[in-house]
Amino acid sequence: MSLQDEIAQVRTEALAAFQSAGDANALEAARIKYIGSNGAVKAFMKRLGEVPKDQKPAAGQALNALKDELTNAHEAAKGAKASAAPKSAVAFDYSEPLAPERVHAAGKLHPLTRTVNELRDLLRALGFEVVEGPEVEDERHNFDDLNIPADHPARDSFDTFFLNKDALLRSQTSTVQVRVMESRRPPVRVIAPGRVYRPDIIDATHHSTFHQIEGLYVDKGVTMADLKGTLQLFVNGLFGEGTRIRFRPSFFPFTEPSAELDCSCPACGGDGCNVCKDSGWVELGGCGMVDPAVFEAINKARGDHAYDPDVWSGFAFGFGIERLAMRRHGITDIRRFLENDLRFLRQI
Ligand code: DAH
C-alpha cells in the first residue's frame, strides 16, 4: 500500500472514530490515537523521509491538511457532545452561596400563635385542658354571672364594644369560665386562650384587640397555695427556673381574695432595669380564688346546685398574651403584633 493510500485509510478511520465516539473518554482516546503527539498523523510525518524528494512538498502539505481536518473534526465532535449532555450531568456546587433571588423564605407561625402554643403546652403538662368560647358574647357571660351587676362600678374598668343591646365583643376571656361551669359538673381544670376587645386608646402598651389566656381550676379543697404553686411552675416554664413570683393584693369582682401576679424581671433578673422601671418586678396578670357569688350565679343558670360553694372551691387566673410575649422577646410596642410587618415578624 502506498503512503498515500495509508493516509487516506487513516483519514477515513479517524473521521469515523470522532463521529461515533460514545462519550468524552472515547473521543479523547480517538484524539490521542490519531492526532496526539504519538498518534498516527505524527507517525506519517516521521515517515516523510521515505518519500522521493520531488514528492516531499506535496506529501508534507497533504499531511498538514490532514492534521487540520482531523483537529477540526475532533473539535466539532467535542462541541456536539458538550451541548448534547443532559443538564443534570453538570455537577452542582452545594457550597456555592445562593443568589438572593433564589433564597426562598420559609413561612413560620406568628409570634402570638407561638406564644399561645407554648402557654398551652406548659399548662397542659399541669393537667389543664384547652377550651374555647365565642368572641361575640352577651352581658350575662361577660358581666352578670362574673359578679359584675349592671350598676357595678367595676364595669367601668371593662369598657366594652356593644354590637347591639344584646350582643357585645367579649372584653375578657373570663366569659369562658362561665360557659365551662354552665355546661360541666365539677371538678374542672381548663385554660381558655382567645381574643378580646376593648375600646382602649391605642398606644405602645394598649390595643383594642388583644389576647388573654384564662385558667380555671375547681375541685374539693383547692387553696391559694395550689394557685401559687401552679403559677410558679408556669412562670418557670415561661421564663426559666429561678424566676421568682409574688402576689400583690388586688380586686376583681369574680375572685376573692384577688391578686396581681408579678415575677422577677426576665430582662434583668430582678436587679432593676428600664423594662421593670428599676423595681426588679414585672406584672403578668390577675388571679384569685373563685368568688362564691360566681358559683351561685352558675347554679342559678344551671338550675341545680352542682357548684356548692361549701363543697367546691377554685382558683382562676387571666393573663394578657401580648404582654407575656413582649416580656419574653423584649418587644416594646404591642401594635407590632397586628401590623403584619415582615421586618418585625422575621426577627422574632
Ligand atoms: N379578666 C381579668 C381582666 O381582663 C383578668 C383576671 C383577673 C382573670 C383575675 C381572672 C382572675 O380569672 O381570677 O383584667
Image (spheres, rainbow, N blue to C red):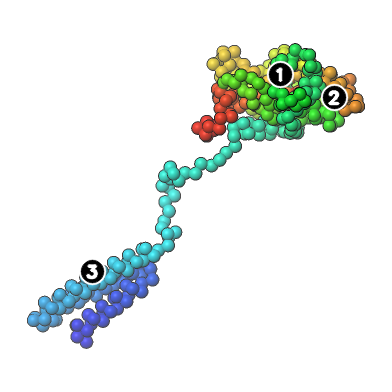
Q: In which quarter of the image is the C terminus?
A: top right
Q: Position of residue 130 (x, y in %)?
A: 74, 33
Kind of element beneath mark 2: helix
Q: Where is residue 313 in the image (x, y as percent from the top left)?
A: 83, 22
Residue 337 in sight: yes
Q: Quadrant of residue 27?
A: bottom left
- Residue 298 image label: 2
Kind of element beneath mark 3: loop
Q: In which quarter of the image is residue 113?
A: top right
Check whether the beta carbons of the residues at disc 2 and disc 3 lie within 8 A of each other. Answer: no
Q: Which residue is drawn at 42% across and 62% down?
A: 86
Q: Quadrant of the N terminus?
A: bottom left
Q: In the displayed image of the protein, which residue is found farthest to the left?
A: 54
Neighbour tally class for label 2: few under 14, some 14-19, many 20 plus, Cα within 10 Å: many
- Residue 158 image label: 1
Decide if ligand 1 comes within 8 Å of the CB at mark 1: yes
At label 1, which amino acid type do we have?
A: Phe
Q: Which residue is drawn at 25% across and 72% down?
A: 70
